[in-house]
Image (cartoon, rainbow, N blue to C red):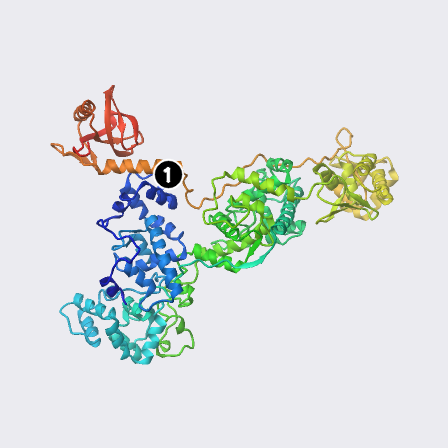
Amino acid sequence: MGIGELDREAHVPEGRPSGTAASPRTLAEALRARGDDGLAALLRARPDLLGPVPNDLTQLATRAGTRASVVRALERLDRFSLQVAEALAVAPDPAPYAVLAGLFGGDRDAAGGEAAEIGAALPRAVALLREQALVWGEDDRLRLVRTARELLSPSPQHPSPTGLGPTVAEATAGMSPGRLQEIVAAAGLPSTHDPVSAVAALTALFTDRERMGGLLDTAPPEALSVLDRLVWGPPYGEVTAKPTPPVSWLRDRGLLLPVSPRTMVLPREVALHLRGGRAHRAPEPRAPELGVARAYRPQVVDGAAAGQAYAALATVEELLKSWDHGGPAVLRAGGLSVRDLKRTAATLDVPESVAAFWLELAYGAGLLASDGEADERYAPTPAYDDWLDQPPAERWARLVTAWLAATRTPGLVGGQDAKGRTLSALGPDLDRAAAPEVRHRVLGLLATLPPGTAADPESLLARLRWERPTRGTSTAGRTGAAPAAASPGTAGAGAEAGAAGPWASETRPPAPAAPPTAPRPAADLRERLARWVLGDAELLGITGRGALSTPARALLNLPLDGPAGPAAEGGGVEPEVAAERAAELLEPLLPEAVDHVLLQADLTAVAPGPLLRPLADALAVLADVESKGGATVYRFTPGSVRRALDTGRSASDLHAFLTAHARTPVPQPLAYLIDDVARKHGHLRIGAASAYVRCDDDALLGEILADRRSAALRLRRLAPTVLAAQADPASLLEGLRSMGYAPAAESAEGDVLVTRADAHRTPPRTAPAPVPDGPPVPDATLLTAAVRAIRAGDHAATAVRREPAVPVTTGGLPRTSAAETLATVQAAALTGSAVWIGYVNAEGAASQRVIAPVRVEGGFVTGYDHTADEVRTYPLHRITGVAELADEDA
């Protein structure tokens, strides 16, 4: 059954409300018929309509039809709702509900399950489109907003996602009357007197199932093969100057119509006949089910997630501690160099992509920034010290909260921007506004499974693609009809090299004018974001073994003991409260900090668990971390002991420290190492001359001078106990230490300089603000105020005015003299009636208002403003004019 036949047999199906009132003629009228809840639902679904609050419903309808707003609304539809909008774009305007249902059911009855699913999902999709003001009108006259129709309707430049082409009337526009009569005659129809009736006759033929079937029965088999390749789109094909007989047969009867000298198109009516009346090859009324990869006990998931959460805290702490005295330099264009990223990855013993993730996480949480100096470098911020002082669970909650809201996307690091420049970690152009939404959607879908259940990643991605398809990833392309078509000249997927049939022999190389139907970058980015989210969530301990952990459920305001329903997310709990609750749930799962280590004879110490912070900080100075894991292994070396002595500690202090915090006796090799390094430490003194070496042992200085490795320092003896160098003190210290000596730096007064562990910090820095993906969703208070203001403004705009004796208006505002204005508002104040005024505020913005004056004095009029729903005072000199309202509105 074709569109024309469906239109003639249109009826409202059982179970659907019939439109008893007259169908609204404009979108503004449809919005005016809504209740306040309906307007609030529209503004909640499309918050961009609130910037600023529209003056009235006409302005709201106009704004709802703008291209940018409609595109944004279409991109937030689920796949079936988008399919419904696509079907309406190729249906008659207006379209009865029965016509729309026919475009999904077709002539042949669908399988029972599919028909039931479509029958249940179609009313919900139409209601959603109505709620978002993309569709308006009663069921007998459904109208797609004009801008949405223009975006979704087929054209040579923008093929329809349905794979349908233009109608016969559209394809024959501009065709000569003689050529039209030739087509009518070849199709076996009687000649007509004008082109309009000829087009109508062809349309009637192509939408008549019986006559159309008879015409196709006479077609050559090769011609039917050509139609089969075009039926599901794209409907365009390129032909040679002398087409073969099958193509000529189709062209002569109007089954293919020319859109250019070398390009033909399959008319929409013919395609619908061949499809059995269906607009989409594969309607998708139901969201794909989430597959289960594996199920664990919730306790196992929480334990694995808690272990990874603690590892995440240790990694961030290790990263920032390595930059305590100043990190890598900032590139001129911003960000971290490739070499520094590799060095950071080596320090953390992770791949570069994972190192970029930890860098961006610390940066997004405000723990890392550039110091703003002339020689700009990265360093921890003062907020890092505050973060270290917090309990581990609270530190984790802060990191995860920052990650959920961040728009910076570390997965892009190493790729290229639109200009071919490499994207660097901590650099510009890494923000993607869709990232927070994708994170919440992925985690929200994981939460719909029972606790402890891990979702199959591919089924999760399929569900995300259904919930947020991107315009341009057409249904035809997804179903394989023409995913590789690059021009209207190709004859669908079957016209590739080597395809059989007469059409393939005439296919030309793809013309560059037509756009591809391959997935857009936006769709590809959303899928990549989703894959990154799954990996990042595991790194952060949000998920354990692929399943959402209990603390993460609390952080997302989700139920802790069962699957989350559609409305479970965002239960009204403030983010700060949710973070506190998540930290409370995580705290008992984390390992307890210990206050001791186990010393071993091989100059190592084993920490059997996470160490208390003072002990960890002191041990990190005295020893080097050799391995990490459930138990951290530290190794004592001459360099690490010298590092501890540089902080001002003595050998006896180090012996006492180890004795106090070791559960085992101090091994003799370790005691000897400390004493040996302490005996040599400070024997040499380095100061600034440019630099000098001072030592009471002149033989030792002679040994240094004789060492070939000291040649680069350019030393010379000034006195028996003093050597001068042409290197700076820092280079001299480093050079002698590399030669195996243990020099100490001294001040200008000759005192030993104690090197404290004081770290370099940036000035106070705020965390980078996420790039918003459009305006935020308004809260209930704002929605209530906005709806009231729009209603009041609409009342003022639609109020019936009493015609003045000499009506004079400017730009829709009343215009009267000052004397007339004063007299009219005074009379209204005496009688208690309402008037219509034009008003220009201090910024020069003009508006119209309905007020009921109660007092006029001192050059001001005070009255109840129906537009603002409150009492206001207006200067008379800013009122452009006044008009009385008709009696029924007064």
How many numbered marks appear?
Answer: 1
Whole-percent x and y of residue 604? 79, 47
In the rendered view, tell whether residue 189 sits above or below residue 158.
below
Whole-percent x and y of residue 729? 73, 38
Whole-percent x and y of residue 791? 29, 38
Give the left or right position of residue 731, taking residue 818 as reference: right
In the foreground, 589 or 521: 589
In the rendered view, tell whether residue 177 sits above or below residue 218.
above
In the orientation shown, which residue stands out farthest toward the front?
A: 15
- Residue 838 appearing in the image: yes
Q: Which residue is mark 1?
A: 783
Q: Residues within 10 Å of mark 1 (few under 14, many from 20)?
A: many
- Which quadrant is the C terminus positioned in? top left
In the foreground, 571 or 86: 571
Q: In the picture, residue 473 is in which quadrant?
A: bottom left
- Which quadrant is the N terminus positioned in? bottom left
- Residue plotted at (79% across, 41% down): 641
- Residue 377 appearing in the image: no
The amino acid on which the numbered mark 1 sits, given as a three-letter code, is: Leu
Whole-percent x and y of residue 11? 25, 59
Give the left or right position of residue 422, taking residue 623 as reference: left
Give the left or right position of residue 80, taking residue 740 as reference: left
- Residue plotted at (52% across, 47% down): 408
In the foreground, 792 or 758: 792
Secondary structure of residue under mark 1: helix
In the orientation shown, which residue stands out farthest toward the top?
A: 858
